[in-house]
Image (spheres, rainbow, N blue to C red):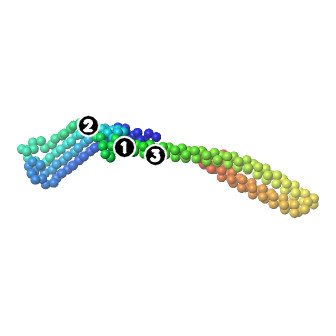
Amino acid sequence: RQEGSHLFSPYFFLNLQTLTDQRLTRNPAIQGNKTIFNGYSVGFSKNTSFGLQAKLSYNLNYTSISGASPTFLPTPLYFDGQPSIEITQSLWSNGFGTSIKASHDALEALAAANQYSEHFQVNLLHTDAETLYWKFSLARQALSVYHSAYNRAAYFQQWVKKRVSMNLQDHSDLLQANAVLELKRLELQGASDEERMLSRLFNSLRGLNSNEV
């Protein structure tokens, strides 16, 4: 959350300029018929909180003039290099640093908002993972309960079937036992499907491509 402080940090800059001028001149003997100019500027700049901007740079210029008479222009090619210090104090649009302070505060507020948003997303992911964990845990327990219920229904169905074969119970009791067994089978199948789905979702949060936990 220190993005705004970068506005006041010194920064390095490099400027390059190049110019080739072949326009007709009024006096070719003095001005030549072609001028080539290359300018380089390198340095550091820094802004302050009260609107002052300071620049320290070194400027190097190269100039070449072709077609001029040596009498009027004995040196058609020359270099010009000089250091430069520039200090600028805003008095209107950025008077006393109001504009740069506003930019600083905006960047700090944006960074804080992003941090809170990321923190919320982390908490949300944590909550979803915890909720899924408990859902999977309960689904696994429920699967065990439905499996036991199905086994009991299967045992009861076999017991009724045996008694019906011995004419100790009516055939309608067997049909009822079969219906109960089928119901328990469907409940067990549904619990198994839910447990498998939750186990895969749970593994996906752990970076695993598997149904087994």
Residue at 23 percent of width and 43 percent of height: 39
Callout 1: 10 Å neighbours few (<14), some, many (20+)?
Answer: some
Among the two numbered marks 3 and 2 on one chain, the one whose residue lies closer to the N terminus: 2
Callout 2: 10 Å neighbours few (<14), some, many (20+)?
Answer: few
Residue under label 1: 98
* Residue toward you, 190 or 127: 127
* Image quadrant occupied by the C terminus: top right
Asked if residue 42 shows in the view, the reply is no
Residue type, mark 2 in image: Ile
Q: Residue furthest left?
A: 71
* Residue toward you, 152 or 134: 134
- Residue 183 in the image: x percent, y percent? 78, 58
Q: What numbered label is drawn on residue 110?
A: 3
The quarter of the displayed image where residue 76 is located? top left
Residue at 82 percent of width and 52 percent of height: 152
Residue type, mark 1 in image: Thr
Q: What numbered label is drawn on residue 85?
A: 2
State how far apart marks 2 and 1 are (Cα): 24 Å
